[in-house]
Image (spheres, coloured by chain):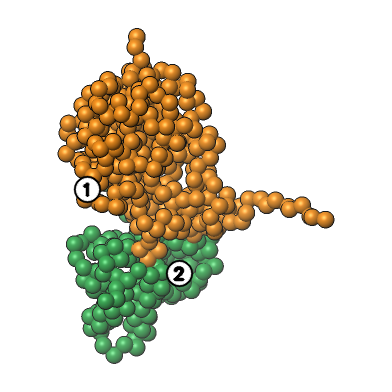
Chain colours: A orange, B green
């Protein structure tokens, strides 16, 4: 049985998702299941010139970077047209990263013209109707390498891949980034983090953490197989959301002390009642440092 | 009527009678036999509903908080401006002060004055969350719509509820030269001007 033919095409991109994928601990084991015809960074059988002749076959098209219909050319050709050509051929289109998925960071340069391939934020672009039946969205900035390998191997094995309304695999995006956070105890008892980079405290109340309302598995499929933003004391920036990037990522927007965004699906009354009661109690174990290192005395 | 419904009704009637007696005679001067006697029930039976006077006191504050919270919730759910909501909240509060003075009196003269009774079991917001949640929602909506100025919750809360509590106290002391209802418009306007966004 022949291997699925894969093309990885970059539009307006920082290379972030390509680089992230190169960090996959089993990169070449994964790629062995596919015929990777073109990748911007990896050695592949074909170069950009051949790719842009639009003569290659394609089963899985991976798109990275934001798109504009006109004004972003490589080799004198609009990248959008090349992407469109292979999109019509491919059995599956996987948009990797929030730029290709929703518009992402580059959209700020020209919000009217720059979008994701099939979504502009959470609104479908004109291409959506044509390609939605084969679209898989992997949003994130960047995506975790294992999110992509999960999707690729599922496609290679023809396994079912349930998707949410934005075409993101539910296996990866059905829960929030908050799920699995090592700070959940602090969230439950409403104990704020006192500063960035510490093990203690919840970053949702003051430091801008968007994990309770961001779909993703960052605290379940750990980064570098060991950690996540929130685990090292940095807020979740909500990078998998169609609204990414927001401004003021290190501050929680509040209305008279009440977080402007509620945890996903939690009614505001329920949240305020529960947190108001939790805040009424002091849990000494959660108030101080968990432990400190005694620094060795220098002679 | 189901037995559970009957029990719930009896429970509420105990709360209402105790609320009146506590507010009228003070927390310490009111005894469980006084409450039982007023309800024409035995002391032993009353203890089937509330195991102590302290437990009853805590249930009463939860009850009053829920009653006031329910009124404000109805206002919060209306599609009206924050200015109009302030007016309606003040109206509800002052009307309650006049028609059910025991509700407000209990808060001012029992809950706030006998912290030793409430310190275990009514920490912080736990017994007044029904009311506090609705006030938070009122502020949150007002700031989100741009009508109210974004500021620390407690500076806004203190201004709003401290003012209303002060007026209720003056009413209770019979110091006000006019009927309390005559102060609704000015009080509402003062609160709105203090809380509205600049510009």
From the image, tell me which residue sits under label 1: A113
Task: Read off the chain for label 2.
Answer: B
Q: Whole-percent x and y of residue B174?
A: 34, 86
Q: Is residue A4 above or below residue A290?
A: above
Q: Residues within 10 Å of mark 2 (few under 14, many from 20)?
A: many
Q: Whole-percent x and y of residue B32?
A: 47, 64
**What's the mark number on residue B111?**
2
Q: Secondary structure at mark 2?
A: helix
Q: Residue A252 versus residue A28: which sits nearer the camera?
A: A28
Q: How many marks?
A: 2
Left or right, B186 with reference to B32: left
Left or right, A89 with reference to A162: left
Q: Whole-percent x and y of residue B45?
A: 44, 54
Q: Is residue A139 above or below residue B113?
A: above
Q: Secondary structure at mark 1?
A: loop
Q: Residues within 10 Å of mark 1 (few under 14, many from 20)?
A: some
- Whether residue B47 is visible, yes or no, is no
Residue at 26 percent across and 69 percent down: it is B147
State which quadrant residue B192 falls in: bottom left
Residue at 48 percent across and 74 percent down: it is B113
Residue at 51 percent across and 69 percent down: it is B115
CA gap, disc 1 to disc 2? 61 Å
Task: Tell whether label 2 touches label 1 (CB within 8 Å).
Answer: no
State which quadrant residue A42 falls in: top left
Quadrant where the C terminus of chain B lies?
A: bottom left
Task: Read off the chain for label 1.
Answer: A
- Whether residue A66 is visible, yes or no, is yes
Residue at 29 percent across and 49 percent down: it is A107
Residue under disc 1 on the same chain as residue under disc 2: no
**What's the mark number on residue B55?**
none
């Amino acid at each position: 049985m022949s291997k699925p033919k894969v093309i990885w095409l970059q539009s307006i991109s920082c290379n972030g998702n390509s680089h992230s994928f190169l960090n996959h601990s089993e990169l070449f084991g994964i790629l062995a299941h596919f015929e990777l015809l073109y990748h911007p960074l990896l050695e592949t059988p074909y170069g950009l010139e051949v790719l842009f002749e639009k003569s290659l076959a394609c089963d899985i098209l991976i798109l990275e970077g934001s798109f504009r219909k006109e004004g972003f050319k490589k080799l004198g050709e609009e990248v959008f047209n090349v992407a469109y050509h292979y999109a019509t051929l491919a059995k599956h289109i996987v948009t990797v990263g929030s730029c290709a998925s929703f518009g992402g960071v580059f959209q700020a340069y020209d919000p009217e013209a720059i979008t994701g391939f099939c979504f502009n934020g959470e609104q479908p672009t004109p291409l959506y109707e044509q390609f939605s039946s084969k679209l898989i969205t992997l949003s994130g900035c960047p995506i975790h390498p294992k999110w992509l390998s999960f999707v690729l191997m599922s496609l290679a094995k023809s396994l079912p891949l349930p998707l949410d309304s934005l075409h993101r695999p539910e296996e990866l995006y059905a829960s929030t980034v908050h799920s699995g956070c090592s700070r959940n105890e602090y969230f439950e008892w409403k104990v704020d983090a006192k500063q960035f980079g510490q093990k203690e405290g919840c970053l949702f109340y003051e430091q801008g953490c968007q994990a309770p309302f961001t779909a993703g598995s960052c605290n379940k499929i750990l980064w570098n197989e060991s950690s996540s933003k929130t685990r090292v004391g940095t807020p979740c920036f909500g990078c998998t959301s169609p609204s990414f990037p927001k401004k003021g990522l290190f501050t929680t927007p509040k209305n008279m002390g009440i977080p402007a965004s509620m945890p996903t699906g939690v009614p505001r009354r329920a949240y305020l009642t529960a947190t108001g009661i939790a805040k009424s109690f002091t849990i000494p174990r959660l108030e101080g440092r968990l432990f400190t290192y005694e620094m060795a005395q220098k002679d | 009527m189901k037995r559970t419904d009957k029990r719930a009704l009896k429970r509420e009637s105990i709360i209402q009678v105790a609320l009146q007696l506590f507010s009228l005679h003070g927390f310490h001067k009111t005894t469980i036999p006084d409450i039982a006697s007023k309800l024409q029930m035995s002391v032993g039976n009353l203890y089937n509903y509330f195991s102590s006077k302290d437990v009853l006191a805590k249930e009463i504050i939860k009850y009053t908080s829920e009653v006031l919270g329910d009124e404000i919730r109805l206002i919060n759910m209306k599609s009206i401006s924050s200015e109009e909501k302030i007016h309606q909240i003040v109206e509800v509060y002052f009307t309650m002060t006049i028609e059910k003075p025991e509700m407000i009196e209990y808060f001012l003269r029992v809950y706030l004055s006998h912290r030793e009774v409430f310190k275990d079991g009514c920490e912080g917001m736990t017994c007044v969350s029904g009311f506090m949640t609705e006030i938070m929602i009122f502020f949150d909506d007002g700031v989100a719509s741009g009508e109210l100025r974004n500021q620390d919750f407690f500076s806004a809360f203190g201004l709003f509820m401290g003012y209303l509590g002060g007026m209720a106290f003056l009413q209770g002391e019979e110091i006000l030269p006019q009927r309390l209802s005559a102060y609704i418009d000015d009080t509402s306007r003062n609160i709105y001007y203090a809380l509205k966004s600049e510009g």
